[in-house]
Amino acid sequence: MRPLTRVDPALPVGAVQTYQIAAPPDIEVVAACETVGCAAWRNGWDTVVDERTDLGRRQAAYIRQRSYRTHRELKTAEGLTAFRFEPGQRCFADHRTRPARYLARAGDWRRNLGLIRSHTRPEDWVEDFAEHQDALKQRLERG
């Protein structure tokens, strides 16, 4: 691995902000379909079961009685039961993701001067970053 080459900054460490996305490598959490961009959540999905088998009967009973998801039942030409689920509801998969933290810190690689903000939503972090860049641009234009 090549050593990291850094340009010496022109500003003192106290005049710098660092925007960082941190995700602990050893932590996973269960995540909602919407959060992970699940295609089934976005588009809806079909689950086809064969009620002539024990497994198929158990799956159909679960969907009808305990899944608490909006669906329609259809019969296929092969005699199978198709459950068509509407978009916008949780699918049957267990999604897992690594939680990300969206941080704005005072300082840079030379010295961390502390946390300014910790955003829970990436959209807020992007907006914060854009506002900071705009403030820098305006300062530069004023001289």
Image (cartoon, helix red, strand yellow):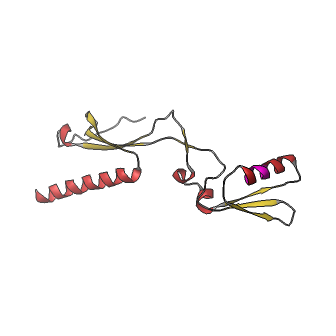
Query: x, y percentage for residue 40?
Result: 63, 57
Residue 80 appears left or right of 70 = right
| Nearest the eye: 73 or 9 | 73
Residue 72 falls in which quadrant of the image?
A: bottom right
Residue 111 falls in which quadrant of the image?
A: top left
Residue 141 appears left or right of 1 = left
Region in magenta: 59-63
Query: x, y percentage for residue 46?
Result: 71, 60
Query: x, y percentage for residue 29?
Result: 54, 39
Circle count: 0
Residue 21 falls in which quadrant of the image?
A: top left
Q: Is residue 61 magenta?
A: yes
Q: Quadrant of the N terminus?
A: top left
Residue 72 appears left or right of 31 = right
* Most distant residue in the left direction: 143
Q: Is residue 84 above or below residue 21?
A: below
Query: x, y percentage for residue 94?
Result: 63, 44
Q: Is residue 98 magenta?
A: no
Q: Quadrant of the C terminus?
A: bottom left
| Residue in view at x 18 percent, y 42 percent | 15
| Nearest the eye: 123 or 138 | 123
| Nearest the eye: 58 or 130 | 58
* Most distant residue in the bottom direction: 77
